[in-house]
Image (cartoon, grey):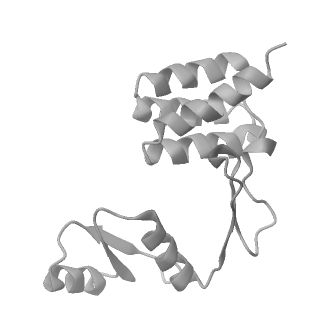
């Protein structure tokens, strides 16, 4: 467990609660609501990473990668599942059923390892409640794959 990074998050910002979290084994404390940039900063600090962002203006095509990573996530290069699966995911996103969307995406991801980057992007967006971005991403593949 020595190699595991633990960032404790709580709505309570009392110093005693923060200290108890650190005494229980946490490496750092982050008050809720968690801001993504703060979390990324703490992760980078504790894991001694540098984040590299490629801003394209099109959020669905944005690449985010670690400087020492050889596999940046790029929506342009993702392998999407079959159209029928995309349609199911789109309907779940449109209905706001994000938990079911994430579960269904995981099941679809088991069909082929090549879908994993796409599926992980969908799950990441679902966890951040980015329904509109999920819809944009899926619709892009639906439009591009229609013959």
The answer to whether residue 126 shows anywhere in this view is yes
Quadrant housing the C terminus: top right
Q: Does residue 68 appear to the left or right of 1 in the view shown?
A: right
The foreground one among 49 and 100 is 49
Residue depicted at x 78% and y 43%: 76
Q: Does residue 130 appear to the left or right of 141 in the view shown?
A: left
The foreground one among 114 and 124 is 124
Q: Position of residue 34 (x, y in %)?
A: 35, 64
Residue depicted at x 50% and y 35%: 132
On screen, residue 108 above or below 121: above
Q: Does residue 44 appear to the left or right of 100 in the view shown?
A: right
Outermost residue toward the top?
147
On screen, residue 59 above or below 48: above
The foreground one among 22 and 12 is 12
On screen, residue 72 above or below 17: above
The answer to whether residue 82 shows anywhere in this view is no
Outermost residue toward the front?
57
Residue depicted at x 55% and y 35%: 134
Q: Does residue 49 appear to the left or right of 76 in the view shown?
A: left
On screen, residue 138 above or below 127: above
Q: Position of residue 89 (x, y in %)?
A: 56, 25
């Amino acid at each position: 467990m020595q190699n595991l990074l633990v960032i404790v998050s709580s709505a309570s910002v009392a110093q005693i609660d923060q200290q108890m979290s650190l005494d229980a084994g946490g490496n750092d404390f982050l008050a809720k609501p968690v801001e993504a940039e703060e979390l990324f900063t703490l992760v980078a600090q504790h894991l001694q990473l540098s984040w590299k962002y490629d801003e394209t203006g099109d959020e669905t095509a944005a690449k985010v990668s670690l400087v020492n990573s050889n596999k940046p996530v790029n929506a342009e290069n993702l392998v999407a599942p079959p159209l029928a699966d995309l349609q199911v995911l789109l309907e779940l996103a449109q209905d706001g059923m994000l938990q079911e969307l994430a579960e269904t995406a995981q099941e679809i991801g088991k069909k082929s390892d090549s879908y994993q980057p796409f599926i992980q992007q969908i799950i990441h967006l679902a966890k951040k409640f980015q329904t509109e971005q999920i819809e944009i991403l899926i619709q892009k593949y639906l439009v591009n794959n229609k013959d």
